[in-house]
């Protein structure tokens, strides 16, 4: 290989830009699905408690409300990270 060819040849040293964007988009979709499932569980629990008129102590009701707003995000962030790591390794 001549000096001119070595400067113009393509080196496969990293990921292609399109692969990174596709992996990021797929990780965002995975995170959205996980967020919606966890949010749906807590929304369903809150609806069921209201529908069946179950009275919870104030501490339990506040804990359910806080968990319903925090846990979907805490589940979605690692799901996005692991989804990205998995998808970026696919051929």
Image (tube, helix red, strand yellow):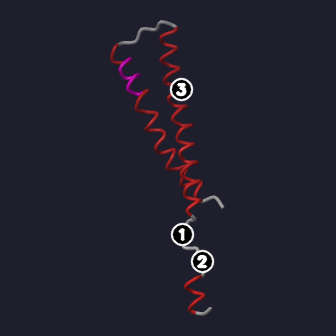
For the residues labelled 3 and 1, the Cα–Cα distance comes to: 39 Å
Would you say 13 lies left or right of 60 here?
right
Within the magenta stretch, is there residue 57? Answer: no
Disc 2: CA contacts within 10 A as few (<14), some (14-19) or many (>=20): few
Q: Compared with residue 56, is residue 85 higher up or lower down, i.e. above or below?
A: below
Whole-percent x, y for residue 13 in the image: 54, 73
The correct choice, above or below, for 85 with respect to 36 in the image is: below
> Which is nearer the eye, 32 or 61?
32
- Residue ID at (49%, 50%): 81
Q: Which secondary structure, mark 2?
A: loop
In the picture, the quarter occupied by the C terminus is bottom right
Earlier in the chain: of badge 3 and badge 1, it is 1
Report x, y in % for residue 89.
Answer: 59, 59
Residue lying at 47% horizontally and 17% vertically, measured from the top left: 46
Q: Which structural element holds mark 3?
A: helix
| Residue behind mark 2 | 10
Where residue 28 appears, as percent x and y from the top left, is: 53, 45
Residue highlighted by disc 3:
40
Q: Which residue is mark 1?
A: 14
Residue 6 image-quadrant placement = bottom right
Structural crowding at the residue carrying mark 3, measured as other residues with C-alpha within 10 Å and reported as few (<14), some (14–19) or many (≥20): some
Q: What range is drawn magenta here? A: 61-67
Q: Position of residue 41 (x, y in %)?
A: 53, 25
The residue that appears at 57% across and 42% down in the rendered structure is 29
Residue visible at 33% across and 18% down in the picture: 59
Q: CA distance from mark 3 to mark 2?
A: 48 Å
């Amino acid at each position: 290989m001549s000096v001119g060819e070595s400067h113009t040849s393509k080196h496969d040293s990293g990921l292609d830009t399109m692969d990174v964007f596709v992996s990021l988009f797929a990780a965002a979709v995975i995170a959205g699905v996980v967020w919606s499932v966890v949010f749906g569980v807590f929304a369903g629990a809150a609806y069921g408690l209201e529908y069946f008129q179950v009275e919870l102590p104030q501490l339990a009701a506040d804990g359910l409300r806080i968990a319903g707003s925090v846990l979907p995000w805490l589940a979605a962030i690692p799901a996005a990270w692991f989804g990205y790591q998995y998808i970026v390794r696919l051929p």
